[in-house]
Amino acid sequence: MNKYSGIPFYRTISSTPLKAFRVVYKQTDLFVLAERDLTSETLALVREIRLPLEAYIFKNPQFLKSLEPLPCDPEAPEIVRIMLKAGSIAGVGPMASVAGAIAEMVGKALLKKGLTSQVAVENGGDIFLALKRDARVALFAGDSPFSEKVSLLIKRELMPCGICTSSAKIGHSLNFGKADALTVVHKDTATADALATSFGNILKNFEDFKKMS
């Protein structure tokens, strides 16, 4: 376990008019920005989203363990189908997209229910963003000299979108590369999560950048 594990180091907010709250359920640890405190509603959504995923994994243990894409399963629960598609696009196992998938499903559900008109949901450093104005997202890269000195300007017209980061140096996610941090912005948060893992696995030296061009 590295020294950053378990520390919400990426949850520093410079300024926002939105209400911030945290929801933790089993392995899911969300940091949410919304127009009001929706802790109980968000917790209920997390349970609702996780239940079919856990049931599917119980019946299909390869879904949890596979590091390669798995075939589409049209009869699977929505979150499973989302993760299977993301893994297929990125060339990785479906669990590489679990944090992004949950973040987006929670965020979209809060919006659809009319509980808030804008929301940001961060899950293990992976973010679903749906705000009414431009946002800056700072990048944390552990001990890198660039850590917290580089940010992404996410324009309002790009939202909703996902901003997901993979790192070989921090966090508990499986990563076979050597990048301090690799961030992907994509309209689909699960896909952004899976692609960040895929690209992160490739990057072992500077020459590997050519493989992604």
Image: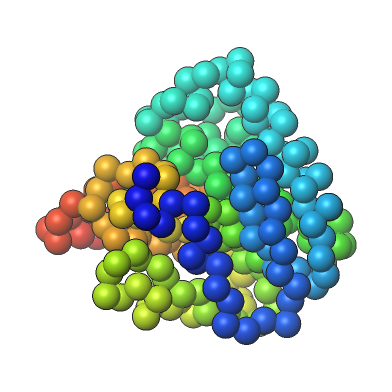
**Residue 122 appears in which quarter of the rendering?**
bottom right
In the rendered picture of this protein, how many numbered marks are placed on residues?
Answer: 0
Residue 42, horizontal then vertical, whole percent: 77, 52
**Who is closer to the viewer here, 161 or 56?**
56
Frontmost residue, 157 versus 175: 175
Q: Position of residue 209 (x, y in %)?
A: 20, 59
Which residue lies at the image location 42% right of the left edge and 45% below the top edge? 172
Q: Is residue 54 visible?
A: yes
Query: For the view shown, which residue lies furthest in the front direction?
Result: 3
Q: Nearer the viewer, residue 200 or 87?
A: 200
Q: In the image, is 157 to the left or to the right of 3? A: right
Q: Quadrant of the C terminus?
A: bottom left
Q: For residue 205, what is the image quadrant?
A: bottom left
The answer to which quarter of the image holds residue 111 is: bottom right
Question: On screen, 135 above or below 29?
Answer: below
Residue 211 visible somewhere in the drawing? no
User: Which residue does the image show at 59% across and 40% down from the upper left?
Assistant: 27
Q: Is residue 34 above or below residue 93?
A: below
- Asked whether 48 or 43 is in front, the reply is 43
Q: Position of residue 202 (x, y in %)?
A: 24, 48
**What residue appears at the point 37 percent right and 55 percent down from the top-left corner?**
3
Residue 147 rendering spot, x and y as whole percentages: 35, 73
Q: Quadrant of the N terminus?
A: top left
134 left or right of 7 in image: right
Q: Is residue 183 left or right of residue 79?
A: left
Taking the view exactly as shown, the residue that stands out farthest to the right is: 114
| Residue at 60% from the left image edge and 34% from the top image edge | 81
